Image (cartoon, rainbow, N blue to C red):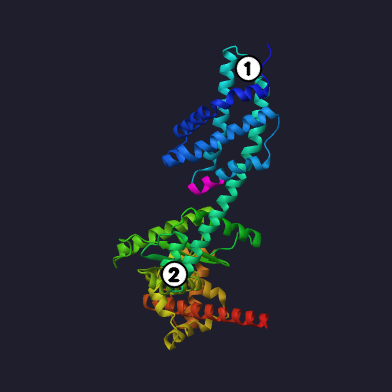
Amino acid sequence: MPGWTSPEFAAALLPRVGEIAAATVAHLTAEVPAYRLLPDSELDGDLLANAEAVLRLFLTTLAEGRLPAAPELAAPVAWGAERARDGVPLEAVLRVYSLGASEAWKLCLAAAGAGDAPVDPYLLGTRLLGFLGEVMPKVAAAYVREQADLDWEQREGGRDLADVLLAGRPVWRAAERYGRTLAERYDVVVFRLPDAPGGAGAGAGAGVLRAVRSELDRGPEVLATLKGGGGVLLVPLAKEDGAGAGPGSRGSRSCTAGRLLARLDAVTGLRRIAAAATAREHAAAPRAHSEACEVLALAESLGRSPRLYRLADLAVEYQLVQPGPARDALAGTLAPLADQPHLLDTLRQFIASGYRRAEAAHALTLHRNTLTYRLGRIHLLTGYDATAPADARRLAAALTAYEATAYEATRETTRETGRGAGE
């Protein structure tokens, strides 16, 4: 029994385009949660109109035995890109095409079951797959481009707002321009991107940076500016966070920033050292940034382990490293050890281990007798016994001052080298 020709079948289905499109939209809203979030005006307007237009285009190309031309695909491609701005996932955007094709196929089978000499199913299936193969990749590509533009706009907006806040300038007008709602207070977090394992080089560093940016894009409420090997994050605080001054409130403040940094560590596979300070109002952001930078530099100079630090965590060390005669006197205590770095390492590890010999010896991969000998040499050269409580406190303070001055000297040498290279 001969079947209908493609033009005849297309002509028979054209009057039912509205019916097929309505069934497609009904299935979409029932099966895909993302579409249920769209307003009724969107579902009954653009979505239905796009479904009808695509079906009509398919039937037209079926009747004419050809694939759709680029100008004919401009409207559905633009519609798919617009859904990115609505927050509809790409999977849901493409679902409309598979559901529309399914409805058309069901009509074909229904006609076959009724014995109405339908179009050849093989021919219809081939033309249908060819049509979808032209439309869906172009829609997906347009959606991805639009999403990339959105991510860029979001990232640039966050960076610009962060820069404005950190510069102490009025920020509300910029926030309105980017359509962003600002928190009243922020944790200002500074961090440096750690080196990739094994010195993998610039390519690995770029990969770490991309991973950080991708993770930050998941939380657009965080304002971020990434420069060089590090960055500054402004993490919004709820009104109750940071309101108190006790230990409990400090823990509450750090949890949001701490969780964010833990996520960054997880996605990069690298732990980073970071510091934070709270800006209780927008005008306080520059001061908080300055404080966080000082705390980060101090933690790095002291060789502290990767984690998030606040001034309260390093308050004693912060006081000890302030320039002045007291710091110089403390640092001078360890001057006799300057040419014996193994003794400085021994003292550093002995203090870090809580003055426990066995733990320090294990960390240094030394025999306990060797550790005892080295501690004796430190006592002989400095006049202070690291195993005596009073002297131990003096040596710990001296080590903090000594490392701070050494760190400053290294930074100054680096700056001088940089200036020389630029001349």
Mark seen at residue 118: 1
Q: Element under label 2?
A: helix
Is most of the magenta stretch helix, strand or loop? helix
Q: Is residue 399 visible?
A: yes
In this rendering, the answer to whether 102 lies above or below 43 is above
Q: Which residue corresponds to the image point at 41% horizontal and 76% vertical from the top-left?
A: 318
Q: Which residue corresponds to the image point at 50% horizontal and 57% vertical from the top-left?
A: 216
What residue would you read off at disc 2?
165
Q: Is the residue marked by circle 1 packed among few (<14), some (14-19), or many (20+) residues within 10 Å?
A: many
**Position of residue 6 measured from the top left corner of the image (x, y, whole percent):** 67, 23
Q: Which residue corresponds to the image point at 55% horizontal and 30% vertical from the top-left?
A: 100
Q: Is residue 84 part of the magenta span, yes or no?
A: yes
Q: Is residue 272 visible?
A: no
The picture quadrant where one finds residue 29 is top left
Q: Looking at this view, is 86 or 421 the one in front?
A: 86
Magenta extent: 81-86
The picture quadrant where one finds residue 352 is bottom left
Between marks 1 and 2 in the image, the one whose residue lies nearer the viewer: 1
Q: Is the residue marked by circle 2 packed among few (<14), some (14-19), or many (20+) residues within 10 Å?
A: many
In this rendering, the answer to whether 111 lies above or below 130 is above
Do the residues under discs 1 and 2 have CB atoms within 8 angstroms?
no
